[in-house]
Image (cartoon, helix red, strand yellow):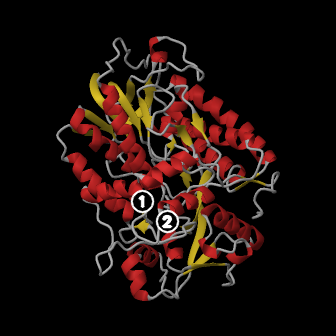
Amino acid sequence: MKRNVDFLVIGTGIAGLSYALKVADHGKVLIVSKTSISETATWYAQGGIAAVMYNPDTFKKHIQDTLIAGSFLNDEEIVKMTISESTERIKELIEWGAHFDKESSGRYALAREGGHSEFRVLHHQDRTGSEIQRALSEKVINHPNIEVLENHFTIDIITQHHLGKIVRRTHTDTKCFGAYVLNPETGHIDTILAKTTMISTGGAGNVYQTTTNPTIATGDGIAMLYRAKGIVDHMEFIQFHPTSLYNQKEKPSFLITEALRGAGAILKDHKGKEFMQKYDSRGSLAPRDIVARAIDNEMKISGREHVYLDARHIPERELLDHFPGIHAKCLSIGINIMKEMIPVVPAAHYVCGGIKTDANGKTSIHNLYASGEVASTGLHGANRLASNSLLEALVFSHRASINAIEQISQTTFMENIPDWNAEGTVLNEEMILITQSRKELQSIMSNYVGIVRSNLRLERASQRLEILFQETEALYEKSVISVELCELRNMINVAYLIIKFASQRKQSIGLHYSINYPDKDKNKS
C-alpha cells in the first residue's frame, strides 16, 4: 500500500516528537514508532537536561565545559549555537507541559554532573526523561495533524536507487522520497512517500552485551542511512556510562544517574577504598570517559566484575526526594542505598557519532534530516558532556523544523516508486540463526571494541564481523522480512562503522582509547 504524507518522522523520542509538533501546523505528519510511542531512550534518561538558567552560570562556561569534555574535537561554532539557544528551547519544553523540580523559592533546582563547572542540569527527580516523554507524547497524540503508527518497523529509506539508478556516497544529488515500513503483525510492507523525512531513531547500545539502552536501540537509523549511501561521522566514539547497576539478570542495565555522584556519592573498590583520585583530580566527578576507563582498570586489577558507588553519607531525605527511582530499584534487588554500597559497572550508553548533519539537521541526502542520538552534529566531539543530549535533540529538531517547513513548498512527491519486492523469499524457520549471530556480535564488540581497544583487537573484530555479515546478508536475501533479521543486519552495519572509524583513529582521545596510542590520554587501562 502507498501513502503520501508531508512530513515522515521515524522515531518517537524527544527529537522526533518535538520536531513533529513544530511541523504539524504546516502539513500532514506521520510518525513511525518501532514499539509504543513512549518506549524510547528519552524515557529512560534519568539525570536531566543541561541549560544555562541563572547566574553565576554563563553560556561561555557551558561552551567551555562542552569543548573540554569533547577533547576539542567538537565543532566550536555548533557548540556555541547549541548552548546559546538552550535556554529558549527549555522554556518551550516547559510551556509544552514538562515539569522540572523547583526549590522552595520557586527557582529551578539545578544539579551538577561530571564535567560541568556549574549547577545547570534541570531534572524531575531521577526520572527526567519519562517526564519529558509524557509531556511530548500527550501533545502529539492530541494534535489533529499527527498520526502515530505504533509497532511498525522502518526497513529502509527510499532513494533513486529504488528507481534503478546508481547512487554513490560521493554523489551530491541523492534524494529521499520516503521509506518502506513493515507491519510485523500482518507482514505487509507499506510504501510511505514523504516530501521530507526525519530520522530520530536513537542509538545503538545493543551492539554491546551490556547497555543502558532499551532493547529497541539497534542502530536502525544509522544503518539505513549508510545503506542509502549517506555520510556518517565519528562512529568510534561510543560512550560507556560508568555506573549502571550490576545485575546480570536484567536487560537493559538500570542506569545509576551521574547526578548521584553530583550529590556526593563516591566510587570505591571492593575493599571500600576510594580510587578515582588516582586517575583524575576531579575524582568521581571527572568526565565519563575517564571514569569508565578507571572503573574498567580497577576491575581488571582486582578481577572483580564490578566496583561500588557509596551514597551512604548523603542525607536520607535528599536520597528519597531526588533519587526515589534508584532507591526503589535497588531495594527491589535487596540493596538499601542508605546503608549499603551500590554495585556498578560501565555499560554502553551513547553514540557520540552517527549521521552527519549540518546546523539545520540536514543530512548529505536531500529532503532527509536527522536529530538526537542518531545524528553527528558536531556538538559532542570525542565525548558527550553529561545531559547535553536531550538539549541537542531539542535544538536541532527546532532548526530542522524551520528548514523543512521552508523546503516543503518546493518539494513534490516522487511518482513511480515501486512497492517492496519480496519475490522468491521464504519464511525463516530457524530463529537460532539470528539469535546466535546477535550474541556473537555483542561478544565481539564487548571484548574487542569496548572501553579499551588495540590494533590487534580491532583487526580480530573486523575479521569475525565479516563472517557474520556474509552469513546474515545471505539469510536476508532469501528470507521473508522480520524485525529480528533487520535489527541484526543493522547492528552488524553499525558495528562495522565503529570498527572502521576506530581503526582509522591513530590516537587515543576522548572515548576512543587504544593501548597502541597511549600518549594523548594518560588514564591508562
Q: Could you tell me how many numbered marks the image carries?
A: 2
Q: Give the residue at mark 2.
A: 255
Q: Is residue 206 above or below residue 496?
A: below
Judge the density around disc 2: few (<14), some (14-19), many (≥20) Cα neighbours within 10 Å. many
In the rendering, at what x and y percent does residue 502 appear? 70, 44
Say above or below: 293 vs 416.
below
Q: Secondary structure at mark 1?
A: helix
Which residue occupies the foreground of this view, 202 or 15? 15
* Residue sitting at x 73%, y 67%: 297
| Residue at 51% from the left image edge and 31% from the top image edge | 225
Q: Nearer the viewer, residue 418 or 257?
A: 257
The answer to whether marks 2 and 1 mark residues whose Cβ atoms lie closer than 8 Å is: yes
**44 or 368, which lies in front?**
368
Residue pictured at 24% horizontal, 38% vertical? 24
Quadrant where the N terminus sits is top left
Quick check: can you spot residue 331?
A: yes
Identify the secondary structure beneath mark 2: loop
Left or right for 396, reference 468:
left
Q: Is residue 189 visible?
A: no
In the rendered structure, which disc, 2 or 1, sits on the residue that comes first in sequence? 1
**Residue 490, image x, y percentages:** 53, 37
Query: Residue at left 81%, top 46%?
Result: 456
Q: Is residue 227 above or below residue 519?
A: above
Q: Which residue lies under the disc numbered 1?
A: 44
Q: Position of residue 10 (x, y in %)?
A: 38, 38
- On the image, which quarter does residue 404 sit in? top left
Amino acid type, label 2: Leu
